[in-house]
Amino acid sequence: MASLLSVSCWLLTTILKLDTTRYCPELKSEKEHKALFIFGDSLFDPGNSVYLNTTRLASTYWPYGEIFFKHPTGRFSDGRVAPDFIGMHAAIFAGLPMLPPYLKPGHQRFTDGANFASAGARVLMPSEAYIDLRGQLGFFKNVVKSLNQELGNIKSKIVLNNAVYMFSIGGPDYAALIDQNPNITESYKNLFVKMVIGNLTNALKEVYSLGGRKFAFQNVGPLGCAPRKRIDYDNCNEDLSSMARQHNIALSAALDGLKEELSGFRYSIFDYYHALLNRAHLPNEHPNTLNRLDDRDERVKRRANKRKPSFFSGPPYVALMPITR
Ligand SMILES: *[C@@H]1O[C@H](CO)[C@@H](O)[C@H](O)[C@H]1NC(C)=O
Ligand SMILES: *[C@@H]1O[C@H](CO)[C@@H](O)[C@H](O)[C@H]1NC(C)=O
Ligand SMILES: *[C@@H]1O[C@H](CO)[C@@H](O)[C@H](O)[C@H]1NC(C)=O
């Protein structure tokens, strides 16, 4: 069957000059094959945290996973997380399978990419409870080694050059900072943002030096308005949200700088901060979300009252409470 298919693909493309990728996806060349490498926190974590040898995570309990997988997978979401959708549906990746957690035992096809994201992951602070950015970068280097072994350096470089590198990172750094230092000074805040962005920039340069060219960022969300903060502070925590905004401005500037400095470096930023805030401010314009969020709102509050601190964070199903009540 496979050979029949290849013969007809050959006919279609060589004799009839039709578009190979459209008719014969299995004939995509290495040049066209796009891998997806994911770095980040709970918003992108497909369950790596489950394989860390730390205490059992909230995301391994019902109702996480309920609407898609029907059971908890370690994703902090009631269904899939953003990279699951992008790999499967974005046209340039069409045909990529859902990437498993990098830490999941067993063989993985790294020509498709890998997902290193880990709930709670920070840029600055290593911990046993998550894989910090440096740790994720270390795993990526292992993947590069195995690609070199598997494909040889030249083909491996093509895969790495064409791949897209997606990041969602920084939120947990600021959340922890403000939690632990409620009266932090403005000058320390500025310094902290500089350190986060400085370390992130260095990580991006390393990915670039290994062949990475296309970077996709989800910026940091309105952290101070996360349901748990709204419960703790009885409203949005403006200190925290302003740190997120400061980070996002610095991130844009840093990426612009890298684009100037590194030839072939390309990036895009999804403005998660405003996308999410708009849903909370204008619930009526997002009716489908609102219905679900009403339930979630109640559930999150009940949970918080039972001191079980967890909430759904997989976009766009985030348990947002409408801000105008
Ligand atoms: C967790 O523990 C197991 C068994 O001791 C070990 O094989 C595995 O490498 C550990 N995982 C991590 C991420 O440290
Ligand atoms: C922070 O400042 C507030 C008021 O300025 C004060 O009531 C509170 O005790 C301070 N908290 C800490 C941890 O220093
Ligand atoms: C990276 O973070 C550390 C703190 O963990 C800081 O001392 C260092 O200056 C940062 N590096 C850059 C380039 O900002």
Image (cartoon, rainbow, N blue to C red):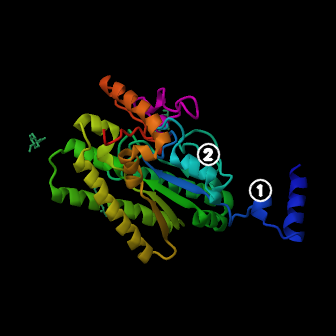
- Give the residue drawn at x 31%, y 54%: 244
User: Left or right of 61: which side holds 174?
Assistant: left
Residue 175 lies in what quarter of the image? top left
Marks 1 and 2, the one that precedes in the sequence: 1
Determine the residue located farthest toward the front in the rendered image.
284
Q: Is mark 2 within 8 Å of ligand 1?
A: no
Q: Would you say residue 57 is visible in this rendering?
A: no
Residue 220, labelled with which disc? none
Residue 50: x and y in percent read 48, 35
Element at label 1 = helix
Q: Does the magenta stretch include residue 72?
A: yes
Mark 2, residue position = 98
Element at label 2 = loop
Magenta segment boundaries in residue numbering: 48-74
Residue 107 lies in what quarter of the image? top right
Mark 1, residue position = 26
Q: What residue type is labelled 1?
A: Glu
